[in-house]
Image (cartoon, helix red, strand yellow):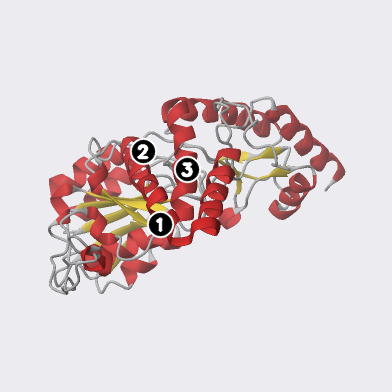
Amino acid sequence: MTFLAPKLGERTLFPNLEARAYLAHAGISPASRPVQEAVAAVLDAYSRRGAGALMEWLPVRERLRQRLARLIQTQPQDLALVPNTTQGVLNIALCFPWKPGDRVLIFQGEFPANVTPWMQAGVEVSFLPLPRVRNPEILSTLEAELSQGVRLVAVSAVQFQTGLAMPLQEMGAMCRRYGAALFVDAIQAAGVVPLDVQGAGIDFLTCGSHKWLMGMEGSGFLYVSPEWVGKLRPRMAGWLSHEDPLGFLSPGGACLDYQRPIRKRADFLEPGTGNLLGHVALEASVALIEELGVPAIHAHVNSYLDALEQGLGRYGFASLRSARRSGILSVLPPSGWSLGDIHRGLARRGIICSTPDGFLRFAPHWPNHRDEVPFVLAAVDEILRQGS
């Protein structure tokens, strides 16, 4: 097993990473050596012992729950382990105690995972315009709608196209003032932007693991505020949602009881067998993030982006970065240049970034060193001079 400590700006724990500069953590993060080794250990145990390996690895789920709780400033019992962000949204959209005439507010530009479930929940969905960089406009627009009656506001902590970090604390206070619940999609924030669900008055928060948490696809978590657990309707409950769900498997027999109560904890939204490989991978990756500390990661990433933004500006790229920092720098290319041509030119030179919805998006993480920035800018210079 690897015992090397993670260090900001050092990619020793990513020995297989091929890219010269991997700047696509807002899409999918590469697997670190500790993640690879953790998953391999589980597979090895199951290949040798089958069912006998289960009890050995189950405690990892509780360690993961504890780490995630610390990450967002809450208690482990407030979390459910879910397969992905979408499932977290679906759980609340389908279990929320809706009433006739209820309305959900969503900002334009939201990732579809935080839109489609609400549109299928049988409630009215209203879309609000989203300024690219200015938070005061967001708050004034939100308050105008809240004053007309809203049951729930669904928002991303960080917008996926532009990296706009939303003013969650102000939004949470405003929602409470008007009696609306606040639901947050944190997949572009958790692991790179400090989060405090209780301090911000967030009612629900969900996040997948394969972006800034640096886990694998198919794993994530959902936070449910204690004041909401007892109000949710268990429409997504399954056999593992009951109190003592495994009791009927005991040797005594005659323990099969379909009337056992549903748990009054967030983990009633863990209805069936979980993704153990995904949980083990996520526990290993979050352990690295915990060791480094999210505030330190946030500062490191933004030091990198400050230098990159300044350099790209000299070549005529228009930055969409707001004063409230996230881990994303999105830019528009200089006049007359194709986004696709620049993106492909960067990829050919070993620089991996992404192009969501017409933007060129750079998303470094803790392993990226600021010394990569001159290499990226030199590649941009070459592309603009040579045309590819």
> What secondary structure is found at the residue carrying circle 2?
helix
* Amino acid residing under circle 2: Arg
Drawn side of residue 175 relative to residue 273, left or right:
left
Farthest-out residue, front: 252
Q: Is residue 7 above or below residue 344?
A: above
Of the two numbered discs 2 and 3 on the same chain, state the one appearing first in sequence.
2
- Camera-nearest label, 1 or 2: 2
Residue 130 is at least partly visible in this image: no
- Tags 1 and 2 in contact by the CB under 8 Å rule? no
CA–CA distance in space, label 2 to label 3: 11 Å
Q: CA distance from mark 1 to mark 2?
A: 18 Å
Question: For the residue labelled by badge 3, is the local secondary structure a helix, a strand or a loop?
Answer: loop
Q: Residues within 10 Å of mark 3 (few under 14, many from 20)?
A: many
Q: Nearer the viewer, residue 47 or 61?
A: 47
Residue shown at 36% from the left, 46% from the top: 59
Residue indicated by mark 1: 85
Q: CA gap, disc 1 to disc 3?
A: 13 Å
* Coordinates of residue 120 in the picture (x, y in percent): 32, 73
Q: Judge whether 227 appears above or below 369 on screen.
A: below
| Disc on the earlier residue, 1 or 2 | 2
The numbered mark at residue 213 is: 3
N-terminal of the two: label 1 or label 3? 1
Which amino acid lies under the numbered mark 1 shown in the image of this protein? Thr
Q: Secondary structure at mark 1?
A: helix
Q: Is residue 11 left or right of residue 97?
A: right
Residue 83, by quadrant, is bottom left
> Which labelled disc corresponds to residue 67?
2
Report x, y in % for residue 227.
13, 49
On screen, 62 above or below 273? above
Q: Nearer the viewer, residue 142 or 117?
A: 117
Amino acid on which disc 3 is placed: Leu
The residue closer to the viewer here, 289 or 163, is 289
